[in-house]
Amino acid sequence: MIPSVLPTYARAPLNFVKGEGSWLIEADGRRFLDLGSGIAVNVLGHAHPDLVEALTSQANNLWHVSNLYEIPQQQALADKLVDKSFADTVFFTNSGTEACELAVKMARKYWYDKGQKNRVEIITYEGSFHGRSSAGIAAAGSEKMTKGFGPLLPGFVHLPWGDIEATNAAITENTAAVLVEPVQGEGGIRPMPDADMKALREICDEAGILLILDEVQCGVGRTGRLFAHEWAGITPDIMMVAKGIGGGFPLGAVLATEEAASGMTAGTHGSTYGGNPLGCAVGNAVMTHVADDEFLAGVNARAGLLRQKLESLVASHPDVFEEVRGTGLMLGLRCKASVPCGDVVKAGYDAQVITVPAADNVVRLLPALNLTEEDIAEALTRLETAAVSLQKQPA
Ligand SMILES: *Cc1c(COP(=O)(O)O)cnc(C)c1O
């Protein structure tokens, strides 16, 4: 019999009932160190007092009004994002994949309004993830996500991950944009080198096409800068954000330059809930913390410490791990071919530490950006326990 919850997830038998900072408390009372953050969502940990205050005080005043009216919390958050990024304008969504929908529509409308109606193609890369909407799965293109779901939204050109030469060669008079994650998340924590990000920007400039960055997972402080592309010293034309921006409240956004957004006039797009007062009240509180140089310096310091400890974990467990990869607090432990990453995640559950599997046999570590040094020490103790339990037993 089908479960009452549609079984599209293979769930672990864990029932978390409370969260405190980097810790999750199971119904049976066990405390788990959370290095997954609901997949890069809870950037300030669980139940941060400022976020609780922002949400509850907004809840006491006004939950929802339509985008037919002014929403001051939305205006304030848009102003903050514009102030802190390349963008001139912002549209709010409830999720990452909705941000992808708009990014695709925006790029196509841009060219349509320029009289180049043929320019509808968007170049994307193998291993990418842009969510589970029809545009999102067509953009990513993997068989795992698209098989069985009928005709896909046309117009996506899929290239090998990070292949700059192939990108150059693939651009035609039908190309509207390039869409890429600066650091692939689901694809196995694969950062695009800064030099390649720069090259992509140059290629797009030369061809006069748009660069769309999907920073749904790598944005909002995750890499130690507010947005990951800042490391490469480039800016996109359009950027997708979600996950961390809501700190645990469903919120996403598309940020764009005035030029790239020029086709999106009144009536061309919309969302009932997108940018609602509750989500934006929390988003403002998240930004107040994360969009701060001192906070980001702290992220880099914690990232350096965690990475150093993970390098020694990998060195002392060569039977289990192959390498540490990633950037900032978006880190991956690539497992030996003989050790499925899912086994490491499960062994972590036994050691009461939460990690997230990804493609390419990688275990993802996406901790709260404000985890403490004690949390980092505890992380290593628990990952060590998990690794020892998986080590090849001497014959
Ligand atoms: C999670 C994710 C998405 C989809 O976000 P949802 O909120 O699940 O729709 C899109 N792109 C990237 C890079 C992601 O990590």
Image (cartoon, rainbow, N blue to C red):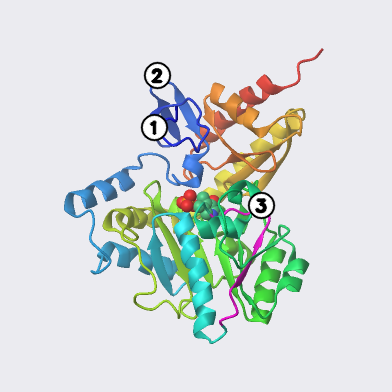
The response on whether ligand 1 sits within 8 Å of label 1 is no
Sequence-wise, the earlier of marks 3 and 1 is: 1
Front position among marks 1 and 2: 1
The residue at 46%/61% (across/down) is 99
> In the figure, is residue 85 to the left or right of 18?
right
Task: Provide residue 198's location: percent of width, then percent of height.
Answer: 68, 69
Residue type beneath disc 3: Gly
- In three-dimensional space, the C-alpha distance between marks 3 and 2, rounded to whole angstroms, equals 38 Å
Q: Residue furthest right?
A: 395
Point out which mark residue 381 bears: none
Label 2 element class: loop
Query: Which of the two discs, 3 and 1, sits closer to the camera?
Result: 1
- Please state which amino acid type lies under the numbered disc 1: Ser
Q: Nearer the viewer, residue 238 or 83?
A: 238
What is the crowding at mark 2: few (fewer than 14 residues within 10 Å), some, or many (at least 20)? few
Sooner in the amino-acid sequence: mark 1 or mark 2: 1
Residue at screen point 61% across, 49% down: 147
Q: Quadrant of residue 75?
A: bottom left
Magenta stretch bounds: 117-130
Q: Is residue 264 left or right of residue 74?
A: right
- Which quadrant holds residue 380? top right
Q: Report the quarter where the C terminus lies.
A: top right
Q: Is residue 393 visible?
A: yes
Q: Which residue is mark 2?
A: 28
| Residue type, numbered disc 2 | Asp
The yes-or-no answer for disc 3 within 8 Å of ligand 1 is: no
Q: Which mark is residue 127?
A: 3
The residue that appears at 51% across and 43% down in the rendered structure is 39
